[in-house]
Amino acid sequence: MSFPVSIKGVLLEAGRVVLLENERSEWELPGGRLEAGEDPAACLAREFAEELGIKIPVKAILDSWVYEVLPARHVVIVTYGVARIDQAALRLSHEHRRLGLFVRDDLDRLPMPEGYRRSIRAWMARGENNVEAENKPRRPFYDGATLHVRTYDSINTGNRLVVRDDASFYRDLARRAGGEVLEIGVGTGRVALELAQAGVRVTGLDASAAMLAIAAGKAAAAGLSERLRLEQGDMRGFDLSGRAFALAIVPFRAFQCLLSAQDQRAALAAFRRHLRSGGILALHLFDPDLRFLLPGASGPIDRQHGTDRDTGRPVEAVLEAALFDHVNQVRRDLWRYRAFAADGTIAEEEALELSLRWTYRWEMRHLLELSGFAVEAEFSDFAGSPPAYGKEQIWVAHKS
């Protein structure tokens, strides 16, 4: 026997749950029937747009049960906790009679399935716990051999749109510069190893010993250790014994881990000290897209899947909250990583944090000029497209 599936979402507005009254005079959660071949998250996004006129990201599954809507008519209900992506006003569609916002104490008096009450209370409780958790610092992404570090290569391949063809871009710059390359934020060596494979000598700097260990292992396995020298250090104040490079690169938004203009200036000064006369600097940042920088916004990616390189276990990463410091232009993303055993149970779990500072194009240009660099070019991707709002910032400058 099979039943239709209905996907429902619990949305809290200032601590109150959003409910809709149906034709049976029952209060229900927004959502609707899952269509053939449709993803539950896509179903909820469609239903919330149709029923309430808003955009939402799905955060977490809450519950599932079989509900007898009418005698001999059953439906499988699956509930998810959701959040807001925009600030649009809630809009009642023709599908329901009324829209209401209710606090926890209202739930027992409202006519609704018990499963809805259970899901609402669960999401409210999680929200209360999250408020407390958000006020506590989480372990940073790169603090030791975290699940993020151990799944990094399986998630962040060169096929991701934001870094597509970046290694080729840096390789062409290296050939033009005609000397050794310094990569700041080398991580696990994705870019550096491609440069080394092309015959370029690279020194890679990173603050994370765990990431450097992975890079060293990959270099040894590929027979490239002689062309890749790895150094641990802070990009704001490193000293490589007076060495001067032809090219310095800071790929995949590593520069945005610097959370103040003062730190950015310090890093740019360190980059400049390590470049020979006329040496080239290439930086990659994201261009701020204000849709993802508003209160309640999620992000372009709020769920990722990878593999733990140490255990082979599948890993899921879920963005639980995004917090904003608009004065200092810092976005703080709170992630939960879970590694799963063969039977589907959680084998390991970590609450991690990634904080990034967004920098506007005009601001970056001023930073470069103030730090003794002359801007040669700026692009919105690694194919050389002109600057564009909300895409990438690719900067090429030389030591002036």
Image (cartoon, grey):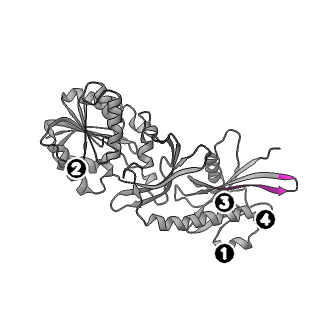
Q: Left of 398 or right of it: where is 195?
A: right
70 part of magenta stretch: yes
Q: Does residue 218 sit above or below 353 in this rendering? A: above
**From which residue to which does the magenta span run?**
62-73
Q: Which residue is mark 3?
A: 92
**x and y percentages locating residue 221 in the rendered image:** 35, 29
In the picture, the quarter occupied by the C terminus is: top left
Secondary structure at badge 4 equals loop
Answer with mark 3 or mark 2, whichever residue precedes in sequence: 3
Query: In the rendered image, which residue does mark 4 sit on?
Result: 25
Residue at (37% x, 31% y) in the render? 165
Q: Earlier in the sequence, mark 1 or mark 2?
A: 1
Find the distance from the CA under tag 3 to the CA under tag 4. 15 Å
Q: Position of residue 44 (x, y in %)?
A: 63, 50
> Which callout, 4 or 2, points at the residue further toward the start of the chain?
4
Q: Amino acid at mark 2?
A: Ala
Residue mark closest to the camera, 3 vs 4: 4
Horizontal and vertical percent position of residue 365: 24, 46
Q: CA distance from mark 1 to mark 2?
A: 53 Å
Instruction: Please tell me how crowded label 2 is: few (under 14), some (14-19), or many (20+) other residues with Cα within 10 Å.
Output: many
Q: Quadrant of residue 96?
A: bottom right
Q: Which numbered disc, 1 or 4, marks the residue that appears first in the sequence?
A: 4
Say which element carries label 1.
Answer: helix
> Relative to the observer, which residue lies in front, 97 or 178?
178
Say the numbered circle drawn on residue 105. Answer: 1
Camera-near label (3 vs 1) is: 1
